[in-house]
Image: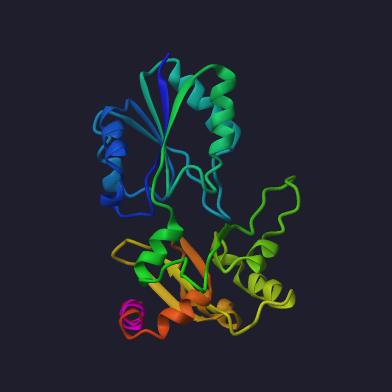
């Protein structure tokens, strides 16, 4: 039997791929990849057959159970099989379902971490998600839940954290803002929406929680995260960081 590698492709830019991930891709015989993986990243898999199994919110996508079965079947025929996921496999990538399927079938596997969108967006803005005296805890959440899953009280986590990063939330911006404000979050809480972090076409929008739906309408359909917290206000008060954020806003 072969081995399955669950590999993080990072937030977008091909040169943010880890060295281990690049080496495994070069040895791969079969690559099952997400829709948002950069074409240049896929080009590293020079010997592999590449199969798109990506999921995009609100669009037709491959069933997870089907992906799980294909990984098992592939490992019984090929030595090196890669499941290439955007960002980090272990964050909102449904990796556990694939891991459970591989374990049940007795297939060997390895996880190769990647840079996640939250840290990529923070890097683009030049704003640390944590800051002494302001932000000592950070939460990553998504408001989306599949049909049949238990209730997703994402807002409780955001309300309890100093800094929050909301994944897959731009399309629900109006509902997100209303939910957080309705449950006591100040409308003047600073936010930033970063789309396509690390890519040449990246865009960033900055405002307050009350502006969230308006900012989301300015964004395109690229992958985006929403950052929420006082670290953004503190950063804007410092000339160097404020200038960094302003330069990204101008490119948008």
Give the mark count.
Answer: 0
Query: Toward which corner of the image does residue 242 lie, by quadrant?
Result: bottom left
Residue 92 vertical placement versus 170 (above, below): above
Residue 206 screen position, x and y as percent: 46, 79
State the residue at coordinates (56%, 55%): 57
Q: According to the image, what is the colour scheme of the structure?
A: rainbow
Give residue 185's quadrant in the image.
bottom right
**Main secondary-structure element of the magenta-colored stretch:** helix
Q: Residue furthest front?
A: 133
For residue 197, side relative to residue 169 (left or right): left
Q: Position of residue 103 (x, y in %)?
A: 56, 22
The boundaries of the magenta stretch are 242-249
Q: Residue at point 37% right, 84% down?
A: 238
What residue is rendered at 32% in x and 25% in y? 29
The answer, for residue 196, to whether it is visible in the render is no
Q: Residue at x 59, y 85 (%)?
A: 188
70 or 210, which is in the foreground? 210
Viewport quadrant of the N terminus? top left
Q: Is residue 96 magenta?
A: no
Would residue 249 be seen by someone viewing this image from the given angle?
yes
> In x, y percent, where is residue 52?
43, 39
| Quarter of the figure with the C terminus | bottom left
Q: Does residue 65 lie above or below 126 as drawn?
A: above
Where does residue 159 sit, x and y in percent of width and height? 66, 68
């Amino acid at each position: 039997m072969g081995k399955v590698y669950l590999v993080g492709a990072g937030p977008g830019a091909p040169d943010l791929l880890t060295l281990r991930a690049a080496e495994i891709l070069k040895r791969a015989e079969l690559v099952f990849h997400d829709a948002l993986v950069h074409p240049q990243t896929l080009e590293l898999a020079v010997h592999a057959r590449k199969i798109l199994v990506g999921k995009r919110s609100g669009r037709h996508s491959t069933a997870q159970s089907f992906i799980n079965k294909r990984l098992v079947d592939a490992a019984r025929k090929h030595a090196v099989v890669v499941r290439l996921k955007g960002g980090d496999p272990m964050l909102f990538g449904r990796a556990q379902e694939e891991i459970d399927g591989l374990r049940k079938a007795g297939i060997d596997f390895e996880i190769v971490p990647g840079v996640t969108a939250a840290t990529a967006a923070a890097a683009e803005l030049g704003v640390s998600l944590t800051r002494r005296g302001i932000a000592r805890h950070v939460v990553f959440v998504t408001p989306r839940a599949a049909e049949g899953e238990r209730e997703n009280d994402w807002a409780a986590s955001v309300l309890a954290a100093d800094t929050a990063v909301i994944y897959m939330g731009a399309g629900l911006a109006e509902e997100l803002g209303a939910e957080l404000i309705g449950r006591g979050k100040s409308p003047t809480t600073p936010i930033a929406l970063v789309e396509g972090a690390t890519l040449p076409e990246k865009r960033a929008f900055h405002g307050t929680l009350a502006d969230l739906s308006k900012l989301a309408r300015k964004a395109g359909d690229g992958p985006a995260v929403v950052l929420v917290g006082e670290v953004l206000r503190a950063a804007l008060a410092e000339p160097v960081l404020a200038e960094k954020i302003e330069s990204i806003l101008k490119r948008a």
